[in-house]
Image (cartoon, rainbow, N blue to C red):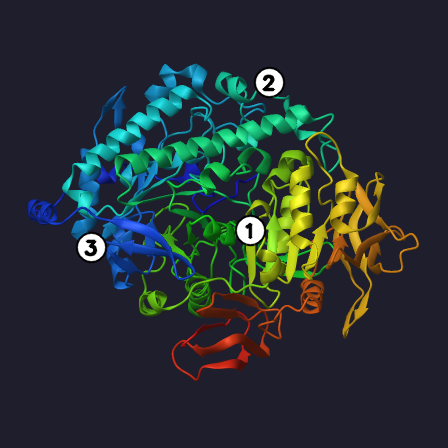
Amino acid sequence: MKLVGTAIAAIPFSNLPGSELFEHRSAELDPDVPKLFDRLLKERACSCAVRMERGGARLYLNGKEEYPLLAVSSSLLHTAQSYRKMGIRFLHPLIGMEDGWIAPGKYDWTRFDNYFSKLLELVPDAFILPRLHPYVPTWWKETHPDELIKCGLPIDPGQYKAVEQVIEGGFNWTALGDPYAASFASEIYKRDTAAMLRDFLKHMEASPLKSRMMGYQISGMHTGEWHYLGCRWMPDYSAPMQKIAGPVPSTERRIDKGGPLMRDPEKDRDVIEFLLKYHKNTAETVAMFGKVIKEETVRRVICGTFFCYVLENVMIQEAGHLVPEAVLTSPDFDYIATPYTYQRSNVPGYQRYDSDVIDDAGNWLGRARGVGGDGAYRVLSESMRRNNKMFISEMDPSTYVEPYRRSEGGSGSETVEGTLKILQRDLGQVFATGHAGWLFDFGHLMPPFKANKGWYDDPPMIKLIKSFADIGAKYRPILDISPVSEIAAVYEPKSWLATQHWWAEEPWNGFGIVISDYFGHWMVNSQARTINRVGAPTDFMYRFDLKTEDRMRFKLFLMVNTFFLTPAEVEQLQALFKGSGATVVWFYAPGYIGPERFEPKQMEALTGFSFKRIDEPGPMMIRCLIDDSGTKFFRDFGVKKPHYPRFAVLPGDDKGIRVHGKWTDSDEIAFAGREHNGFTSYYVGAGPVPVEVLRWVAEKAGVRMWSTKADNVRASKGAAMIVASDTGERIVKFPQPMMPVGGGVARREHRLSMEFGEVKLFVRTA
């Protein structure tokens, strides 16, 4: 079983080179470095902020708005200058803090002065945003054996106490996955790492480098993205975790192999409560680090982290961010970052990195990465905006300069044409949606890679990336980046506290991403492929970020996994939708899980339907019966593997119920619509719902379809991007006149002839 996460997470540690370690220590500075420090001493301390203005998050550096495009690399010492040719001067180096933590209460940070100075020597006008990793050194682990993670399953040989592999920046790649680590519940760990972080920041605040430090990102645990270390082997049975969240239930009860899709709160309350406390501790500890950074820098520079992953969060009950509020609402974090989609192909005969995804009926749901893929985000980006956070997309596709083709995340294209289309899509999405981004290349990480150069360091790519940096600098300050979507995709993270465990799906047959649960893989991740190419923009958000005014703004709500709701939350949703005239699609079991027990009445109150619970395992497969408004769809969709429970709509004598699909193994209704409490309610018992069905529902809801094809559309009020899902002509209709970037007439309607994967970018000129 391979781990999936960021491209970092996918690197096999055993293949990393053992020589040339600690490159940052031995990097020699030329004689002009004292002059550099003299010059920096004459500069004022850097001031950097994220401000919510003109519709979204904007980056200000020393009082001037800047286009937020940054660079990360497995070796910035080799790639920083090529990034500068692309118009990028904001560098994001990877820093292993344990490398400067030499003994209890003793630190040596001068080696990082050396490293940062070398970067400024290479790019004199650079600003630096270090990614800080507060892992603990070996001596700390040996001193505090009772504070270490304890897993409930045997750890694979070679994965525990793995050989350290340290590259420039003191960054130990092994620490990203080695469960020989401090428990995140340990108060001693929290105390000692907070003290270490404070000392590092005090050192930087007293350094001439202060004028070039634009902020700090805090990253840690598995893959550096705050997924719990050892998540594959069922953590954490350590004394610290037992103290704050225990008694920790047995692995057998947590996994419940062969059990139902939903946990019964009356029988499994201890499992649900453990997971709630476990995830709350993670978020609160990450928030603590952000508070330290803001305190020590006197809030003068920005602070960010990886967090709030919802889509494609593998091993989700152990590795997820299921109680994100402490980070999401923290005033100490200015931005949240994440790599974009890593979903791999599940099409028989295809390479995994092709990333085409189908359901068990053969419906093409879409493509994640690669040419023509949606390149969609794994966080709920509208929730980032609503919580005053800048969202940064980590763009890490491999390119034609890299001969090694990956079987998991990070894959790109082996051709020049394909590479440029992918980069246009990734950079265009950042621009059109009003978000931020950084490029991350692994070309110098050998093995497993073989490029021996930056993945983007070649004239055609340098030219293209530079053009997007210029477009961003020209247009972002003058454009309104407010959202324009009429579709909202809504998610409830705490549902995973009470749904089937990801281990229960082993061996994950037909999955594009293994080590995932049924709901995560099929009804969240795979469903996102069709939502993203519905042909109109969609806003993704948490259920708790819905506002009263959304009843007027959105015409279609997709309530993807709102299974676990309190009575008060059910009432809030009822009030939101009542009399709105909107269309609401409810997936599987909305509101069925309550804090104390199953609540079928909540499910009926939300949807307006009466239900029959089916406890006989059966395929999660629906035979669609749509013949309406020119749309005919009579295919099956869903997943063949038997699961339970399922639900069937009971029609009774109600003539207002419209039947759109039935379970394939019976005559029971699985997909239906009706009018309810002043809105149109649809219930669908399984997913992923094909794009043809979503477009039909959206059009009936009155959603403006921006493209006449099922294209990937991304937009804000000021800009838009179209990525063609097939070859041919389409008509694109904008709410306001928009002009093609690169020249052309501003019009509301554009007739476009496009190839599969071709990217078109537009801006509003008035």
Q: Are marks 1 and 3 in contact (CB under 8 Å)?
A: no
State which tag comes first along the sequence, 2 or 1.
2
Q: Which mark is residue 541?
A: 1
Q: Which residue is mark 3?
A: 123
- Residue 107 in the figure: left or right of residue 594: left
- Helix, strand or loop status at disc 3: loop
State which tag comes first along the sequence, 1 or 3.
3
What residue is drawn where x is 57% and y is 50%? 546
* Nearer to the camera, 576 or 429: 576
Compute the Cα span from label 2 to label 1.
33 Å
Q: Quadrant of residue 8?
A: top left
Name the amino acid, label 1.
Met
- Helix, strand or loop status at disc 2: loop
Q: Which residue is mark 2?
A: 247
Compute the Cα span from label 1 to label 3.
38 Å
- Helix, strand or loop status at disc 1: strand
* Nearer to the camera, 718 or 250: 718
Q: How far across and down, in percent of the image, does residue 531 sit?
A: 62, 59
Q: Residues within 10 Å of mark 3 (few under 14, many from 20)?
A: many
* Position of the N terminus by quadrant: top right
Name the amino acid, label 2.
Pro
Name the amino acid, label 3.
Val
In this view, the mark in front (3 or 2): 2
